[in-house]
Image: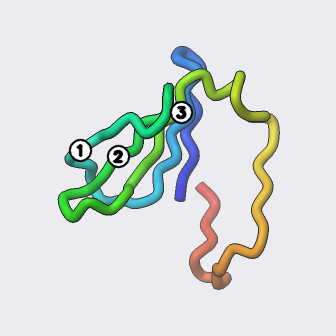
Amino acid sequence: MKLHYYRETDSLYIDLSETSSVDSREVAPGVVADFDAQGKIVGIDIEHASVIADLTRVDTESLPMSGDTIRDE
């Protein structure tokens, strides 16, 4: 999973998969979900992200990860 913040549009994209999206649906005002060809969610786009969320920090809890799946980029 990757988080991408775009300052020029104040949008946050949560990339859930490396699979390409083929369909997008607005699931709430300003929130668009992207889906692959099988209908699985692959990403979430949030408009006006800095108004909705505190973008100065990211916390995680109880993620099922092994040491070999964590990478620095």
- In three-dimensional space, the C-alpha distance between marks 1 and 3, rounded to whole angstroms, equals 16 Å
The residue beneath circle 2 is 34
Instruction: Please state, as top left, top right, bottom left or bottom right, where the C terminus lies in the image.
Output: bottom right
| Residue 64 screen position, x and y as percent | 65, 80
The dot on residue 46 is: 3
Number of residues whose C-alpha sits closer than 10 Å to that of mark 1, classed few (under 14), some (14–19) or many (20 or more): some
The residue beneath circle 1 is 23
The dot on residue 58 is: none
**Mark positioned earlier in the residue sequence (1 or 3):** 1
User: Farthest residue toward the front?
Assistant: 28
Which amino acid type corresponds to the residue marked 1 in the rendered image? Answer: Asp
Residue 6 sits in quarter: top right
Which amino acid type corresponds to the residue marked 3 in the rendered image? Answer: Ile
Which amino acid type corresponds to the residue marked 2 in the rendered image? Answer: Asp
| Residue 67 screen position, x and y as percent | 67, 82
* Viewer-closest of 30 and 17: 30
Q: Are marks 2 and 1 in contact (CB under 8 Å)?
A: yes
- In three-dimensional space, the C-alpha distance between marks 2 and 3, rounded to whole angstroms, equals 11 Å
**Residue drawn where x is 26% and y is 52% of the image:** 20
**Mark positioned earlier in the residue sequence (2 or 1):** 1
**Residue drawn where x is 46% and y is 57% of the image:** 16
Q: Is residue 23 left or right of residue 57?
A: left
Task: Give the vertical position of 28 relative to 34 (above or below).
Answer: above
